[in-house]
Image (cartoon, helix red, strand yellow):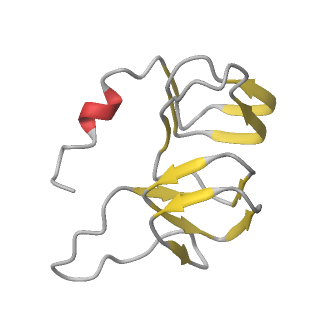
Amino acid sequence: MKAGSHLKGLQGMGSVFGVATRIEGTVRIEESVRIDGKIEGNLDQPDGNSRWIVIGPSASESIELLEGCEVRGNIVHKSINVEPGASLHGQLIASENGTVEPAANQDQGPEITA
């Protein structure tokens, strides 16, 4: 992925949850969102239409990919659970602190840190 090419997907972002935002419970996604804060609960997309859900690099802890979800990009994680029927087009990268040093001269594509 070329630098800045992810911005095309961000142009249609409807909402942004900032780093200082903490949400508990279920969030119903009816537009594309970017999450830099912390969510303890579920993201629900009730109408089944495709949406962008961008997880910023400051997110941490654990992630759960449920049946029917689709992720395009690498996931750097401390803890992860992937249900059968979830789709991942990228790499799962385990990390004690939720970060990873990129390999020299290697384009790893977008990265989801959780």
Q: Is residue 15 above or below residue 18?
A: above
Which residue is depicted at the point 66% across and 42% down? Answer: 38
Task: Kindly give the residue lying farthest to the front in the view shown.
Answer: 85
Q: Is residue 114 visible?
A: no
70 up-or-down from 108: above or below: above
Q: Is 107 located above or below residue 19 in the figure?
A: below
Question: Front-most of 18 and 76?
Answer: 76
Near-viewer residue (109 or 88) = 88
Residue 28, percent from left and from top = 72, 22
Residue located 41% across and 23% down the image: 13
Residue 56: image location, x then y, percent: 47, 46
Whether residue 4 sits left or right of residue 59 in the image: it is left
Which residue appears at 22% of the width and 69% of the height? 107
User: How many numbered marks are there?
Assistant: 0
- For the N terminus, the image quarter is bottom left
Q: Quadrant of residue 96?
A: bottom right
**Image quarter for residue 10?**
top left
Q: Percent from the top left, x then y, of residue 32?
A: 50, 25
Q: Residue at x 48, y 55 (%)?
A: 112
Q: Residue furthest right?
A: 25
- Residue 51 lies, with reference to residue 102, above or below; the image says above
Quarter of the image for the C terminus: give it: bottom right
Which residue is nearer to you in this view: 53 or 90? Answer: 90
Q: Can residue 86 be spotted in the picture?
A: yes
